[in-house]
Structures are given as structure tokens and as C-alpha cells.
Image (spheres, rainbow, N blue to C red):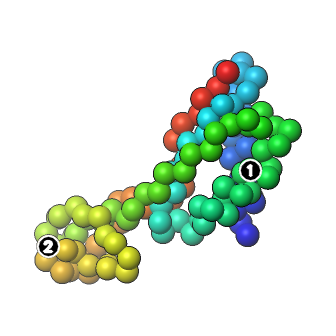
Amino acid sequence: MHEYSIVQSLLDSCDENAAKNQATKVTKVVIKIGVMSGVEPELLRTAFDTFKEKTICEKAEFIINIQPVIIKCNGCQEESTIEGNEYHCPKCKSVDLSVLDGEDMYLMQLELE
């Protein structure tokens, strides 16, 4: 379960940002998880809820936005969102694709007090 190490890194980032901004608590944490990131959102939520106790994020609302896979066809240059295991261009059916989004996890927003 690498979600636990991800949460520890996320909490560390929250601490650093709060310190930089002279904040005493974090009230909201918003992240974006790509469907191809390898991160299981519900396990991450459980890990966050478990490890946030007695931290600056103890009362923080945790919002997870799921990012679908966005590709660009290297043949016809069309940008599309793909669903499931459809790794081809919906327009020209080429499999020569570049993934533009949906593979990573990002901290998008913190609300601090």
C-alpha cells in the first residue's frame, strides 16, 4: 500500500506550505489523481483520514478530483479523453498516441488559516 507513503509526503507538503505562509492549520486539501496514476482514491482517503490526526491537517476537508486520461493523436493531432482500455484515437483509430494528462497525482489547492 504505497498510499500511506503518498499521504506522508502530502502531509509534509502541507506542513511546509503552512510554515511558509505562517498558517496554524490547513482547512482544505484538494488533489487531482489521474486514473492511470496507480493510486487508489479510496485507499488514499482512508490513509489521509488515519494519518492526519494530530497534524496541521487534523480538521482538513480532503477533496479528490479524478482526472481521466487525455491523449493527443500523433497522426491526426486530435486531443481526446479516452475511457477504459480504449487506447486508440477516436477520430482516426491510430494507436500512435501521447498521454497529456491522467497519469499523475497533484496537490492542487490548500486552504490555510
Q: Secondary structure at mark 1?
A: helix
Q: Looking at the figure, which quarter contains the N terminus?
A: bottom right
Q: Residue at x 54, y 51 (%)?
A: 64
Amino acid at dot 2: Lys
Going from N to C along the chain, the mark reached first, 2 or 1, is 1
The image position of residue 95, as x and y in percent, is 26, 81
Identify the secondary structure beneath mark 2: loop
Q: Position of residue 103 (x, y in %)?
A: 47, 63
Mark 2 crowdedness (10 Å alpha carbons): few <14, some 14-19, many ≥20:
few
Identify the residue under disc 2: 91
Looking at the figure, which quarter contains the C terminus?
top right
**Point 71% across, 21% down: residue:** 23
Instruction: Report the residue marked by disc 1.
Output: 49
Residue 60, quarter of picture? top right
Q: Is residue 83 left or right of residue 4?
A: left
* Residue furthest right as drawn: 54
On screen, 8 above or below 91? above
Q: What kind of residue is marked 1? A: Asp
On residue 112, which mark appears? Answer: none
Q: Is residue 110 above or below residue 113?
A: below
In the image as oriented, which residue stretches furthest toward the top? Answer: 22
